[in-house]
């Protein structure tokens, strides 16, 4: 890749890509179960569906879908519980920290684009210290559309003053790859994320697939 084609910015999904929020998201699911007199489930039951937010957590915790007549009430209860504990156990993935350090040292700006609403995303990003380093935070309610629509990614690139075609978008969900491709960005699917229960990561059509955060630094255009 020539100098003119080098990546000028990296954008990351939040949950499952930059941070491990499963302990708090799943923990809120168990807190909701406890209120209903139900025993706690293993975190491993919640982890694969963490990327699906409240819908995924309620599906695991109470085996209900959005079509259930009590879904909206239970979703409200779940989100209130999660908001009260959302920074208790959530951390930046240990192996991601040196990657962010390397990006900062190289002067390569990076930002966050998440479907998590700002009510939850901003406090979590602040609690993990990412707010002091990330050049932009675009949340699920920042633009009229959320991922897989490309609007959030276009907004992030606009705020950073970077051509979308010179950005990489890194995420752990099919929606991340779909949004990145629709925005004309290079896409990177990460295998350490939550991944969900849909198509396997190999079928997402990402430009790159990596198993460890450090591999991001070796991708074409990053040097």
Image (spheres, grey):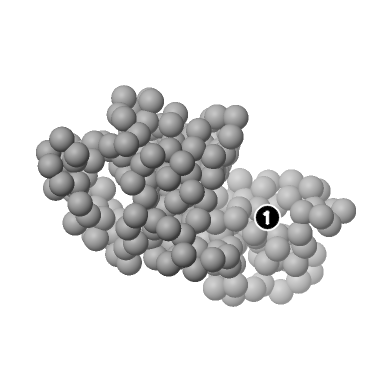
**Depicted 221 relative to depicted 49: above or below:** above
Total numbered labels placed on residues in the image:
1
Q: Depth check: give the residue in front, 217 or 177.
A: 177
Whole-percent x, y for residue 63 in the image? 75, 67
Residue in view at x 68 percent, y 67 percent? 60
Across and down, in percent, residue 46 comes to 59, 67
The residue located at (85%, 53%) in the rendering is 70
> At 49% across and 68% down in the image, what residue appears?
200
Q: Residues within 10 Å of mark 1 (few under 14, many from 20)?
A: some
* SS at mark 1 in the image: helix
On screen, residue 24 versus residue 223, left or right, reads right
**Left or right, 41 with reference to 203:** right
- The residue tagged 1 is 55
Residue 112 shown left or right of residue 55 in the figure: left
Above or below: residue 134 compared with residue 202: above
Q: Is residue 14 visible?
A: no
In the image, taking residue 94 as reference, residue 155 lies left or right, namely: right
Where residue 37 sits in the image (x, y, percent)? Answer: 79, 69
Q: Quadrant of residue 198?
A: bottom right
Q: Is residue 95 above or below residue 131?
A: below
- Answer whether residue 69 is visible to the viewer in this image: yes
Quarter of the image holding residue 208? Answer: bottom left
Residue pictured at 36% horizontal, 41% vertical: 185
Task: Examine the rendered structure and indicate whether residue 162 appears above or below residue 179.
Answer: above
Q: Position of residue 215 (x, y in %)?
A: 24, 60
Q: Nearer the viewer, residue 72 or 40?
A: 72
Instruction: In this rendered view, identify the residue nearer to me: 153 or 206.
Output: 206
């Amino acid at each position: 890749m020539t100098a003119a084609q080098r990546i000028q910015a990296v954008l990351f999904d939040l949950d499952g890509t930059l941070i491990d929020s499963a302990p708090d998201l799943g923990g809120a699911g168990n807190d909701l179960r406890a209120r209903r007199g139900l025993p706690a489930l293993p975190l491993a039951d919640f982890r694969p569906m963490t990327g699906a937010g409240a819908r995924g957590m309620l599906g695991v915790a109470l085996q209900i879908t959005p079509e259930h007549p009590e879904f909206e009430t239970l979703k409200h209860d779940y989100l209130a519980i999660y908001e009260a504990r959302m920074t208790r156990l959530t951390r930046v993935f240990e192996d991601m920290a040196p990657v962010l350090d390397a990006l900062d040292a190289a002067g390569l700006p990076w930002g966050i684009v998440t479907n998590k609403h700002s009510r939850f995303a901003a406090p979590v990003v602040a609690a993990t210290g990412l707010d002091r380093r990330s050049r932009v935070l675009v949340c699920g309610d920042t633009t009229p559309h959320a991922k897989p629509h490309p609007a959030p990614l276009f907004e992030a690139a606009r705020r950073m003053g970077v051509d979308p075609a010179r950005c990489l978008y890194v995420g752990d969900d099919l929606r991340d790859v779909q949004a990145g491709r629709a925005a004309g960005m290079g896409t990177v699917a990460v295998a350490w994320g939550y991944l969900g229960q849909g198509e396997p990561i190999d079928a997402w059509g990402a430009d790159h697939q990596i198993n460890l955060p450090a591999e991001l630094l070796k991708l074409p255009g990053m040097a």
